[in-house]
């Protein structure tokens, strides 16, 4: 991404030169390898208004495999651009019932190419014993989502993806994570307990009322901070990272993991850019890589 990011401005930036630098930076600063490494699995912006979106398996998989081999797990979020017009939102571009996406035609073909390429990358991770927390198409309660799919249409799209990955590609290394933004919490489109393993909120407990976390627990699934942001009105770079786990302990102790957001538009959201990251990762409630060794020690 272009560090001089401007919202809504399509651009053609060069590939990010070092996709693993944040993880190494945290390790160099704290002495800990984080338990979960997260990444976006597509060149979301570079292909804007086209059907040329790529899956970044060649760039990312070697680093994800390396993290798995040091005892960590992987979270991949996936922003597919609209298979109809290549946008990321602002208007309805698919019918409410999902037929345009799932029945034969050019829109379906565009969708299947992306699913196929994602599955190929996930198969390489499976073949290297990498467990993946797969978080696709998140934020379906936001206005920028490229479809007004209703709950049943959204479930059809999600179920089709799970079936394709599982039965066509034989992928058995995936835990399916569905997440939403808290700010627009109404209208969550839950895909269903049979095809969702974990539910998450793209926020942290210090930003949201405890009742929102309770609403996630009602699904009967493990819950997570799927995309952790700095608390409101925090000066970036001055955030006390210890408050992440303190907030979880106090407000939502059933949270199972958190992934801290990192993006060039928000370069100081990440742990190494703020205060007390070492103390956060050494907290007795935190499990770092190697995960199973850490569990045994605890």
Image (cartoon, rainbow, N blue to C red):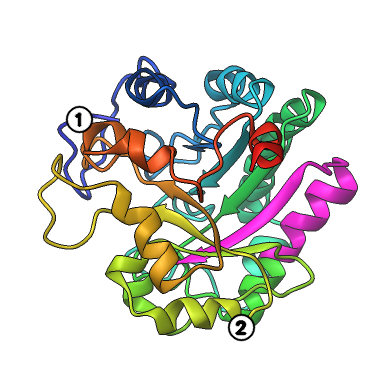
Q: Where residue 277 sits: x, y (%)? A: 32, 37
Where disc 2 sits, the SS reads: loop
Where disc 1 sits, the SS reads: loop
Residue 218: image tag: 2
Identify the residue at image location x=87%, y=45%: 168
User: In the rendered image of this protein, does residue 27 appear above or below residue 277?
Assistant: above
Q: Where residue 10 sits: x, y (%)? A: 26, 40
Residue under circle 1?
A: 3
Quadrant (top left, top right, bottom left, bottom right) of the C terminus: top right
Residue 170 magenta-highlighted: yes
Residue 281 magenta-highlighted: no
Identify the residue at image location x=61%, y=54%: 107
Q: CA separation, marks 2 and 1?
A: 39 Å
Identify the residue at image location x=23%, y=29%: 2
Q: Where residue 273 sits: x, y (%)? A: 23, 33
Left or right: residue 100 compared with residue 187: right
Region in magenta: 158-181
Please say whether residue 44 is visible from this viewpoint.
no
Query: Toward the viewer: 10 or 170?
Result: 170
User: In the rendered image of this protein, does residue 256 appear above or below residue 134?
Assistant: below
User: In the rendered image of this protein, does residue 216 appear above or below residue 137?
Assistant: below
- Give the class, few, some or many, for how many residues have Cα within 10 Å of label 1's Cα (few <14, many ≥20): few
**Image quadrant where residue 198 sits:** bottom right
Quadrant (top left, top right, bottom left, bottom right) of the N terminus: top left
**Image quadrant where residue 4 sits:** top left
| Nearest-to-viewer mark from 2 and 1 | 2
User: In the rendered image of this protein, does residue 65 appear above or below residue 282?
Assistant: above
Which badge, 2 or 1, is on the more N-terminal residue? 1
- Give the class, few, some or many, for how many residues have Cα within 10 Å of label 2's Cα (few <14, many ≥20): few
Left or right: residue 58 compared with residue 27: right
């Amino acid at each position: 991404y272009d560090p001089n990011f401007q919202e809504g401005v399509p651009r053609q930036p060069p590939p990010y030169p070092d996709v693993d630098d944040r993880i190494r930076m945290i390790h160099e600063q704290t002495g800990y390898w984080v338990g979960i490494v997260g990444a976006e699995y597509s060149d979301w912006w570079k292909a804007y208004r086209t059907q040329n979106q790529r899956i970044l398996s060649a760039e990312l998989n070697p680093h994800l495999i390396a993290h798995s081999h040091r005892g960590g797990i992987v979270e991949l979020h996936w922003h597919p651009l609209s298979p109809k017009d290549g946008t990321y939102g602002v208007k309805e571009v698919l019918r409410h019932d999902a037929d345009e996406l799932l029945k034969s035609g050019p829109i379906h073909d565009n969708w299947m190419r992306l699913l196929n390429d994602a599955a190929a990358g996930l198969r390489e991770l499976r073949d290297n014993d990498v467990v993946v927390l797969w978080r696709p198409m998140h934020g379906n309660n936001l206005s920028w989502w490229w479809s007004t799919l209703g709950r049943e249409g959204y479930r059809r799209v999600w179920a089709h993806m799970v079936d394709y990955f599982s039965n066509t590609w034989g992928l058995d290394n995936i835990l399916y994570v569905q997440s939403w933004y808290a700010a627009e919490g109404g209208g969550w489109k839950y895909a269903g307990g049979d095809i969702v393993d974990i539910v998450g909120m793209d926020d942290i407990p210090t930003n949201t009322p405890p009742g929102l976390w309770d609403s996630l627990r009602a699904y009967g699934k493990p819950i997570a901070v799927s995309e952790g942001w700095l608390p409101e009105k925090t000066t970036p770079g001055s955030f006390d990272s210890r408050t992440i786990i303190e907030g979880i302990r106090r407000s939502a102790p059933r949270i199972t993991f958190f992934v801290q957001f990192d993006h060039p538009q928000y370069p100081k959201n990440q742990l190494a850019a703020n205060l007390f990251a070492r103390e956060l990762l050494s907290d007795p409630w935190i499990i770092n890589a190697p995960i199973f060794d850490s569990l045994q020690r605890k």
